[in-house]
């Protein structure tokens, strides 16, 4: 059996649902998959009833038969724990396992992910079904790995059941020990919210104006993350007792209110992702032009995945148009887009790509979520494209195990990710700068990494990046401030945006001069701040004769000590006030910018600091193409991806190997509509 993510091959797979199809189709399906390059299938994530059709009654014949058929076809299998959709007999007999909405009304059976992580009954049944499946199938020779549940927190990332309130209270007792400590941390003296008994504390509930204490909500998001992680670890610990040596454990997707980095470190061998770039073309989106770069935006999501696992897998890759009978309407991928999106995933670090799904489902909510095959089951254009993708991946085996090479990094942390979700002021800044930095990097062909940090992060993690953006480090801790100082002192260049360090870890605003814990490092005093006014248009900054956009929000600055003013605002009542300050600190520098980072502004920073276009000596590319680079030793693998429906011309400025053809190439090359190229070269320096 082929084994994924071993550093030796790029492999393809698909998601298969044997319970949806007559057994007579299994053998033919698996044969057609193998013929078209599929090496592995994922099964069973919604098939609880096939193993436990009634409480305490276990039957293994169905998947025994399927695995026997898979073995005969030499098909590897990724087996799932089926806990993403508890059966009707369970939710009917134990209704406490169901989630509730913010009004406390129970969510009913009938979809998926309708459970809560904290109901004792659900954790008990989830543990039992995981153990039964692992005990029976764990040593099966066809199985190469395991997926826990399916898309943790997908669609449902808030939980309001009675079980969640009870568990939330225990979470808070462990964290704060006493109500006095909790009241202090949450600032409950505001609006007379002081708690005098633990049973007065609830998860967020319906309020008069749908507002809650931001400090409670921040801890609530942390609680949801811990609940989800403990649920995954419950299953992972059971699986580890039974599975074969070398078989992996993963789960798929990255979703809200979940520390996916800690979840992976605690319970998984690597993360896998579900990539659906066709979402960009749903009919409520602009199909002609979008400031978020349409399907190219999925490269940003893949960079998030790579921050967790440098080399990862795609468990669900777009193969047909998405759609439920209740929502989502999108065109089918055009010829070449399925291959383009596959190479997009591989370019960013995926060594395994599994398509969702083999065949479009003929029943249920996802009847319009198209797979490789349509309802008719006949050969089609997408199946032919799969065969061509397989031929390409056969030529890419040399880059398996290589890692993405970034020219700079963008710092993130979960405290600020979650704070930006609950705080509208923070969210607006985060959305503008997150999109702006990504867009500027894409359009200047400057690969970058997301770098998640916490209070345990070491200098070694940061030191590999000569330049780091920390767009809006609203929540700051002493340990993170110390880490940033060490990074700059050792030679790093740090770029801070507006609203830095004005909150502590509880989300409160200490009475200190801004930017708080970062004032010593930045050499900046924020004397005033404001949202920009709509009637003034775009606020800009003059940076040594270069216009720098400063939209949304402006910090008005003054330099401290040896810090120097580089740029000043050009209009509004604070025209000529400092907007950009640099301070030399040790061997490095820190820039404090009083605005958010638009696409134009981020591009100015990349150009001014000499980061933009690190491969200009090797390539000349139009903006519509992405350049991604994977590295193994002194070998570089350059992916050029054309996201347009028109052919484009690119130029290779030195001789390289075209990995698709194994031919040496240089000079002008035409990439067809949605075309891709992968070029290899050895570069000793850098």
Image (cartoon, rainbow, N blue to C red):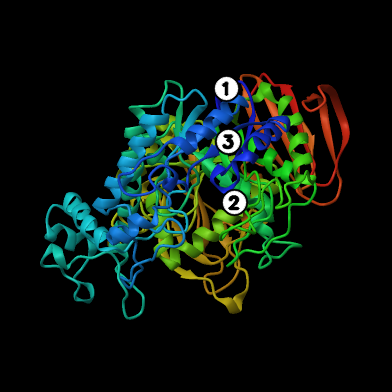
Mark 2 vs mark 3, foreground winner is 3
Specify the quadrant of the image occupied by residue 613. top right
Task: For the residues labelled 1 and 3, say whether their Cβ atoms are less than 8 Å apart.
Answer: no
Please state the total of marks drawn on the protein image: 3
The residue at the point 49 percent across, 70 percent down is 531
As measured in the structure, the alpha-carbon distance from the residue carrying label 1 to the one carrying label 3 is 12 Å
Q: Which x, y percent locates residue 81?
A: 42, 41
The residue at the point 57 percent across, 56 percent down is 597
The residue at which mark 3 appears reads as 41
Q: Which x, y percent locates residue 437?
A: 59, 51
Task: For the residues labelled 2 and 1, say whether their Cβ atoms are less than 8 Å apart.
Answer: no
The residue at the point 53 percent across, 71 percent down is 532
Specify the quadrant of the image occupied by residue 281. bottom right
Q: Secondary structure at mark 3?
A: strand
Specify the quadrant of the image occupied by residue 388. top right
Residue 536 image label: none
Left or right of 649 in this view: 477: left
Q: Earlier in the sequence, mark 2 or mark 1?
A: 1
Around disc 3, counting alpha carbons within 10 Å, would you say few (fewer than 14), some (14 to 19), or many (20 or more)?
Answer: many
Left or right of 465 in this view: 48: left
Around disc 1, counting alpha carbons within 10 Å, would you say few (fewer than 14), some (14 to 19), or many (20 or more)?
Answer: some
Left or right of 252 in this view: 664: right
Using the rendered image of the protein, determine whether residue 547 is visible from the camera's viewpoint: no
The residue at which mark 1 appears reads as 1
The residue at which mark 2 appears reads as 437
The one nearer the camera, 129 or 453, is 129
Placement of 172 over or under 106, stated as above or below:
above
The one nearer the camera, 168 or 247, is 247
């Amino acid at each position: 059996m082929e084994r994924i993510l071993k550093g030796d091959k790029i492999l393809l797979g698909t998601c298969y649902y044997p319970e949806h199809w007559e057994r007579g189709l299994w053998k033919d399906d698996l044969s057609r998959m193998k013929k078209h390059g599929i090496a592995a299938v994922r099964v069973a994530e919604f098939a609880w009833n096939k193993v436990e059709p009634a409480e305490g009654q276990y039957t293994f014949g169905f998947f025994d038969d399927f695995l026997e058929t898979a073995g005969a076809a030499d098909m590897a299998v990724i087996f799932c724990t089926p806990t993403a959709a508890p059966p009707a007999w369970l939710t009917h007999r134990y209704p406490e396992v169901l989630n509730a909405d913010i009004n406390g009304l129970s969510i009913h059976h009938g979809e998926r992910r309708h459970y809560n992580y904290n109901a004792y009954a659900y954790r008990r049944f989830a543990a039992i079904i995981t153990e039964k499946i692992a005990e029976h199938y764990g040593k099966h020779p066809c199985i190469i790995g395991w997926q826990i549940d399916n898309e943790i927190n997908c669609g449902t990332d808030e939980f309001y059941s009675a079980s969640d309130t009870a568990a939330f209270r225990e979470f808070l007792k462990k964290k704060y020990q006493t109500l006095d400590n909790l009241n202090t941390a949450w600032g409950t003296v505001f609006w007379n919210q002081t708690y005098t008994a633990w049973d007065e504390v609830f998860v967020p509930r319906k309020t008069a104006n749908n507002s809650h204490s931001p400090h409670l909500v921040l801890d609530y998001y942390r609680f949801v993350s811990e609940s989800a992680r403990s649920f995954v670890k419950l299953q992972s610990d059971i699986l580890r007792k039974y599975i074969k040596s070398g078989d992996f454990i993963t789960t798929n997707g990255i979703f809200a209110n979940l520390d996916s980095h800690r979840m992976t470190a605690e319970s998984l061998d690597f993360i896998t992702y579900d990539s659906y770039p066709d979402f960009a073309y749903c009919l409520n989106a602009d199909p002609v032009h979008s400031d978020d770069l349409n399907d190219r935006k999925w490269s940003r999501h893949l960079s998030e995945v790579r921050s967790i696992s440098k080399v990862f897998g795609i468990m669900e890759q777009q193969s047909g148009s998405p759609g439920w009978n209740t929502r989502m309407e999108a065109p089918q991928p055009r010829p070449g887009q399925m291959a383009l999106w596959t190479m997009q995933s591989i370019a960013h670090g995926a060594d395994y790509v599994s398509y969702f799904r083999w065949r479009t489902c003929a029943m249920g909510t996802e009847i319009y979520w198209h797979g490789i095959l349509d309802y008719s089951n006949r050969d089609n254009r997408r199946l032919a494209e799969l065969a061509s993708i397989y031929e390409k991946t056969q030529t890419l085996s040399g880059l398996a195990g290589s890692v993405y090479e970034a020219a700079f990094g963008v710092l993130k942390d979960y405290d600020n990710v979650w704070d930006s979700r609950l705080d509208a002021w923070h969210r607006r800044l985060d959305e503008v700068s997150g999109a702006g930095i990504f867009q500027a990097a894409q359009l200047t062909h400057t690969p970058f990494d997301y770098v998640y940090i916490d209070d345990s992060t070491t200098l070694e993690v940061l030191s590999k990046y000569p330049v780091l953006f920390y767009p809006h480090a609203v929540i700051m801790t002493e340990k993170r401030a110390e880490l940033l100082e060490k990074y700059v002192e050792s030679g790093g260049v740090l770029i801070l945006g507006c609203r830095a360090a004005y909150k502590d870890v509880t989300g409160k605003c200490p009475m200190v001069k801004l930017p708080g814990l970062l004032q010593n490092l930045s050499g900046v005093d924020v004397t005033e701040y404001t949202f920009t006014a709509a009637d003034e248009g775009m606020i800009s900054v003059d940076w040594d004769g270069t216009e720098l956009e400063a939209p949304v929000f402006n910090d008005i600055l003054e330099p401290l000590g040896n810090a120097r003013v580089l740029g000043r605002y050009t209009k509004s009542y604070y025209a000529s006030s400092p907007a950009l300050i640099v301070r030399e600190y040790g061997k490095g520098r820190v820039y404090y910018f009083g605005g958010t980072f638009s696409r134009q502004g981020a591009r100015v920073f990349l150009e001014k600091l000499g980061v933009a276009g690190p491969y200009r000596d090797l390539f000349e590319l139009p903006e519509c193409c992405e350049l991604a680079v994977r590295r193994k030793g002194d070998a570089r693998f350059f992916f050029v991806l054309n996201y347009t429906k028109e052919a484009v011309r690119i130029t290779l400025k030195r001789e390289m190997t075209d990995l698709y053809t194994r031919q040496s190439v240089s000079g002008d090359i035409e990439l067809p509509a949605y075309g891709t190229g992968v070029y290899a070269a050895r570069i000793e320096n850098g």
